[in-house]
Amino acid sequence: MSHPTVAELRPIDLFTELDDAQLAPWAEAAVIHEAPAGETLVEQGHIGYGVTLLLEGRIELLVRDGEVQDPMGFNEAPTWIGAIPTLIQGGSAVTMRADSDVRFGLVEPEDFITLTLSQRSVFRRVMAQMRPVIGRFTARQQQRERLESLGTMAAGLAHELNNPAAAAQRTASDLADALEVLSRAVGVFVESGLSREDAEQLVGLQRQAIENGASRSAVSTLDAADTEDELSDVLDELGIGDGWVLAEPLAAAGVDRAFVEQVIEVAGDGATAPLRWIAAGLSARKLVAELAQSTEQMSHLVTAIKSYAYMDRGEVVQVDVHEGLETTLTILGHKLKHTQIQINREYDTSLPRLTVHGAELNQAWTNLLDNAIDALGESGRITITTRADGDCAEVDIADDGPGIPQQIRDRVFEPFFTTKEVGRGTGLGLDTARRIIVDRHHGSLTLESEPGRTIFRARLPVDAAAR
């Protein structure tokens, strides 16, 4: 077992203020190790590794994110690594891997703590590094939380937009076909030798079908299918081509056998073209309405996402807390769509507008509501209650799920704490919610839980951000 010399340790800035006599115990405590490029020196989370005094080479620092190792940077000799987790007796915050062949002295935890506490200048240097190191990790975690929140929004928005977008695409294609029939109708009528009087009668019949269709109420799917089948049989019996195609729009408008016979009486053997023209007109109106509905739904979702993120507004905004809760529910709609989860709202509409960091507060609602949805699984009830209490607004997000076990109840607001399996998120998101509500808005976030009743209560001053 070999040790570094005092001269080898001298370039390391941790020991800048030490003389040779003070540095000698460090040389005696450090044990020389060598490792080739690519070798892992210590895994993230390992406890009791000690402090690395890097004498030669370069070490890469990585942070595990699920199954992925994210690079955090490099440390080149001469330097020191691992003092803070060793001093607080915690696990290594990073994985250290040799980026080149390395030579270093390793100081055991107990030796490092004893020497550091006995030499004030070393202790000061370690403490001076604690704030920026913790700051970097905190900033990284906050950035990750923002990205996760953005990912939740993006996934929800993409899922919710998919249905109306696909419907609009199908509708546009069908509408193009209907317009093609309508655009050729006049030419077809002229070529068939249809008289002016007969054309006027067909126009009258078309108007009659349109008016009937506009006045009809929606019928059940089963009834509509039966009506279409009956009309399709009538069209086939009367020799009308493509009867199965024409039956749907004509049946929806209340067209019956008598109507079809009137068209045949006017158009004779060429009745298929007028019926196709009438059906195309009916389809076009229906498709335009469907297209408007689809685009309106997409517009509603885009409005919701803008409101959620408070785009085009300053960071501090005056908001209606209910607007934030509702847009958050819209964003999370994809998680609720295929469940039996009910959302009950007990809103106090007299609540004043809050002065808050709007986008951050919505992130807190996202984490609390997402957590409640996960707790319920496929069925249950979430109740959102708002009320005024003095100069504060209170928001309860309650679920009737299994509750939070007593043994972990005090830990749910801890950073990184989770009950989920490895690789699924960094936690329950409750630490983020607590930091936004408590630290950023000077409010409080409390928990009450028992089987069948869990309540997270957020209390926010009306002028939270102004404080």
Image (cartoon, rainbow, N blue to C red):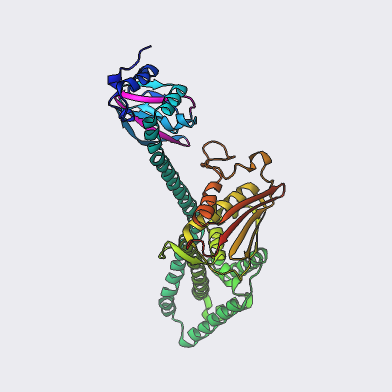
- For the point 51% across and 57% down, the residue is 441
Residue 65 painted magenta: yes
The image shows residue 16, relative to residue 320, as above or below, that is above
- The residue closer to the viewer here, 172 or 450, is 450
Where residue 278 appears, as percent x and y from the top left, is: 52, 75
Say whether residue 360 is left or right of residue 378: left
Where residue 66 appears, as percent x and y from the top left, is: 48, 37
Q: Quadrant of residue 29?
A: top left
Is residue 162 among the parts visible in the rendering? no
Q: Give the quadrant of the N terminus.
A: top left
Question: What's drawn in magenta, residue-wise?
Answer: 46-66
The image shows residue 232, relative to residue 336, as above or below, that is below
- For the point 42% across and 47% down, the residue is 143
- For the point 62% across and 76% down, the residue is 216
Residue 85 painted magenta: no
Say whether residue 275 is left or right of residue 223: left
Where residue 421 appears, as percent x and y from the top left, is: 57, 37
Residue farthest toward the top in the current orientation of the protein: 1
Say whether residue 361 is left or right of residue 453: left
What secondary structure prevails in the magenta region? strand
